[in-house]
Amino acid sequence: MRELWLLRHGKSDREVVCPDFDRPLKPRGRRAAQRLGDWLLAHGLRPDLVITSPARRALNTAQLVSGALGLDEQLMQEPRLYFHGIEEIKNALADCPASAQRIMLVGHNPDFEELLTELVGEDNLPDAEKLLPTAALARLEMPDDWSELEADCAKLIDILYAKSLPE
């Protein structure tokens, strides 16, 4: 079974005066990313490939989760994940190797929530004010070809919220 994981970056520090791209994680965001990585490791869940937005908060989130999983070598930066819209995210997925069965993307809202809604269908999502708050991971069952991602082609497996995981 092929899976796509959409991980929204950890809580960023909006009080730091810097360009949006350079905004760092808050300590709370770093802890949440580490907790999520530790939980995935404990449950034997590992992606084949980790692709992250190059924005600092997303990259740091990806590094923390990948580090916990021992996947530092599989971490790739992809500029199309930084607010380029869902078509560019789908194009980035289409460029992934066919051999990758589980891909984790680390990036931003609103693009990730829009992609999740398109792939799964609005009627198949939990009723929540915000589907992907910071440090949330949506796991989707996907079709066999990363380049053929039509509306309603995926099935939601679950959404993990780092804040709900044990310390």
Image (spheres, rainbow, N blue to C red):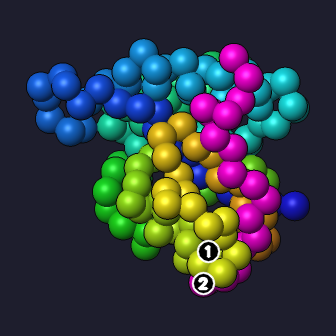
The residue labelled by disc 2 is 151
Q: Nearer the viewer, residue 159 or 82?
A: 159
- The percent coordinates of residue 49 (x first, y second) are 66, 42
Q: Quadrant of residue 147?
A: bottom right
- Decide if residue 46 is in sight here: yes
Q: Which mark is residue 80?
A: none
First-in-chain label (1 vs 2) = 1
Amino acid type of the residue that numbered disc 2 sits on in the rendered structure: Ala
Q: Nearer the viewer, residue 140 or 134?
A: 134
On whether residue 158 falls in the magenta region, the answer is yes
Q: Is residue 119 left or right of residue 20?
A: right
On whether residue 148 falls in the magenta region, the answer is yes
Up the image or down, 27 lies above or below 134; here it is above
- Decide if residue 74 is in sight here: no
* Element marked by disc 2: loop
- The quadrant of the image that shows the N terminus is bottom right
Q: Residue at x 49, y 60 (%)?
A: 129
* Element marked by disc 1: helix
Q: Which mark is residue 119?
A: 1
